[in-house]
Amino acid sequence: MSIEINKVGIIGAGQFGFALAYLISENNPHVTVSITDNYKAYIDSIIETQQHPVFHKGVVLKNTVTGTYDKAEA
């Protein structure tokens, strides 16, 4: 029996959360990833540039990753 996952929510867009979103999206292009954080600047940057403003400079997330301010949505 296999389970197909279509969406993943990540709470925390810091160094580890961002890296996790990147790895999931790179290895599972059919999966939608939503990432949220209390720190608005992290989410603003992910929404606007698909990049983290502090960590992992130069790493760009795939368009299957979306930033959100709503934890329930993530």
Image: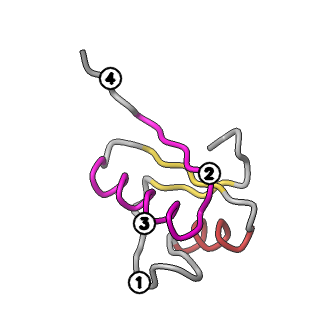
Label 3's element? Answer: loop
**Of label 2 and label 3, which has the lower sequence position?**
2
Q: Which mark is residue 18?
A: none
- Closer to the eye: label 2 or 3: 2
* Circle 4 residue: 3
| Residue 15 left/right relative to 19 | right
**Of label 2 and label 1, which has the lower sequence position?**
2
Q: Position of residue 20 (x, y in %)?
A: 43, 58
Label 2's element? Answer: strand
Q: Position of residue 74 (x, y in %)?
A: 62, 44
Kind of residue indicated by mark 1: Gly
Kind of residue indicated by mark 4: Ile
**Of label 4 and label 3, which has the lower sequence position?**
4
Q: Residues within 10 Å of mark 3 (few under 14, many from 20)?
A: many
Position of residue 44 relative to residue 28, above or below, is below
* Circle 1 residue: 58
Magenta-highlighted residues: 6-28
* Circle 2 residue: 11
Give me the C-alpha separation between circle 2 and circle 3.
16 Å
* Circle 3 residue: 61
Kind of residue indicated by mark 2: Ile
Position of residue 70 relative to residue 20, above or below, is above
Q: Position of residue 64 (x, y in %)?
A: 43, 53
Task: Residue at 59% x, 63% y: name it.
Answer: 13
Give me the C-alpha separation between circle 2 and circle 4.
22 Å
Position of residue 4 relative to residue 16, above or below, is above
Kind of residue indicated by mark 3: Leu
Position of residue 42 relative to residue 1, above or below, is below
> Which image quarter: residue 39?
bottom right
Task: Residue at 52% x, 79% y: name it.
Answer: 55
| Residue 8 left/right relative to 67 | left
Label 4's element? Answer: loop
